[in-house]
Image (tube, rainbow, N blue to C red):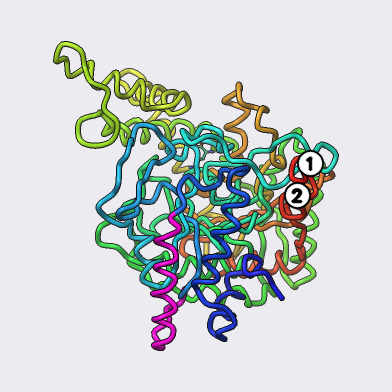
Amino acid sequence: MTRPTDFTLRGALDALAAREISAEELARAHLDAIEALNPRLNAYVAVTGERALERARASDARRARGEAGPLEGVPLGIKDLFCTEGVRTTAGSRILGDFVPPYESTVTANLLRDGAVFLGKTNLDEFAMGSSNTTSAAGPVENPWNRRNDPDTRLVPGGSSGGSAAAVAARLALGATATDTGGSIRQPAAFCGIAGMKPTYGRCSRWGVVAFASSLDQAGPMARTVEDCATLLRSMSGFDPKDSTSADMPVPDFAAACGRSVKGLRIGVPCEYRLDGMPAEIEALWQQGLEWLREAGAETVEISLPHAKYALPTYYIVAPAEASSNLARYDGVRYGLRVEERDGDLQDLYERTRAAGFGAEVKRRIMIGTYVLSAGYYDAYYLKAQKVRALIKRDFDEVFAASGAKVDAIVTPATPSAAFGMDEKQDDPVAMYLNDVFTVTANLAGLPGLSVPAGLDTQGLPLGLQVIGRAFDEETVFAVGAALERAAAFEALPAVMAGKTARAAG
Ligand code: GLN
């Protein structure tokens, strides 16, 4: 029999519907798994066990009354960037102190409406800034995977949604919420061998999600299969009058799109994504992915996105600029941490609170952001970056243009490397920023991007492929992603599951 934690989300919904398992049993199995593995992985910063069991029992009662919602009884992890009513929300920072939101974010409220059961809050890089989940005030998250020949090196799960990714990969949740400003869903999904979808900007409401860079932030799902991401996204999505950038668009049945044929689709292969120094196995996997799609009847087409090479520097101006503005609200006055001032000096209150509350990476971003927005530098940096951002978006508009029928989707590697060691790249911010080289373009252009686990590197670590699509055409992205998933038949298990590493055995 399938262990309850081994179900896919779809499999769990079927088993719940067939009364083979109850929501309470499913929640309990996951809480037990969290108890066993979380001390090592640190994927959850808070486990809300009592609340989960209570909600699971209510879910079982709803199902018994014939009122089951689309996610009835499904246990999920919630990135601790989503405000959850009555449950402490930290954004991975000390500065929020013991902040307990009196409201629920729209995305999590939508999931609850559809019957989901929240197991707890998952770890993340502070304010979602990072690619390694090592900047969290709650400590680093460990990737459940290990290198085959070097099982003792602890690897990062990627970031910023490293807790969500590790939890899903290690069977501590059937799925999780995450957010992606420059790659924070797709990169950790790739590092942990799971699927992760950043939807079109505006697809999911940002209301109640702690803001990092408002013009780039998008919520999205992580799960072990593409279809499970599609199922979660349908519940998460929808117009929200409380977010002025939320799109008033119909929400399609994304899961149904996973079964669509890719026959006749045109898949773009951008030459600018062929980076110097990229590991040969990543290039090989990319070629393999394209071959799989051709075998499934798609056509692959070389395309050019000439401004893609400016995406990373553009992102690292726009994102810190918006962050410096968004994070100005943490001043010790209204909520969160307060470090008392000397001599009644308000400025001193701000300085002490912010000095104690923010970590090094967040301070770096605030400084970069204030610099690029300051008089004298605004035109040279921020304004220039906005112009380049428009050109990056125009490149995509041209290849996706309906007239001339260029391409229907683009396929690239998800990341330029597999998961790295917790001590690697930590003292080199630029090396860390390079993690996002393949993912930031989709955020700058507002497009949907999906990461699909597609293979293993020579060390036995997962590698992902990314599918980028037209705005609000997540359905084609899911169809292509599901085709890659079927061909890749990725079934490898993280070391922590197989109990293979020396430390896991010890
Ligand atoms: N790694 C990127 C950064 O540090 C992206 C983070 C994100 O998508 N939230 O900004």
Determine the residue positioned at 63% across, 59% down. Answer: 171
Q: What segment carries the magenta color?
A: 48-71
The three-letter amino acid code for the residue at tag 2 is: Ala
State the quadrant of the N terminus. bottom right
Determine the residue positioned at 55% across, 46% down. Answer: 43
Q: Nearer the viewer, mark 1 or mark 2?
A: 2
Give whichever of 501, 480 is nearer the camera.
Answer: 501
Is the residue marked by circle 1 packed among few (<14), some (14-19), or many (20+) residues within 10 Å? many
Dot 1 and dot 2 residues touching (CB under 8 Å): no
Residue 362 screen position, x and y as percent: 43, 28
Helix, strand or loop for the magenta stretch, by majority: helix
Q: In the rendered image of this protein, does residue 277 appear above or below residue 353?
A: below
Left or right position of 255 against 337: right
Determine the residue positioned at 59% across, 67% down. Answer: 478
Which labelled disc corresponds to residue 147?
1
Magenta stretch: includes residue 191: no
Residue 472 screen position, x and y as percent: 46, 64
Mark 2 sits near ligand 1, with its Cβ under 8 Å away? no
Q: In the rendered image of this protein, does residue 448 appear above or below residue 150?
A: below
Determine the residue positioned at 34% across, 26% down. Answer: 373
Residue lying at the far bottom in this picture: please name it: 66
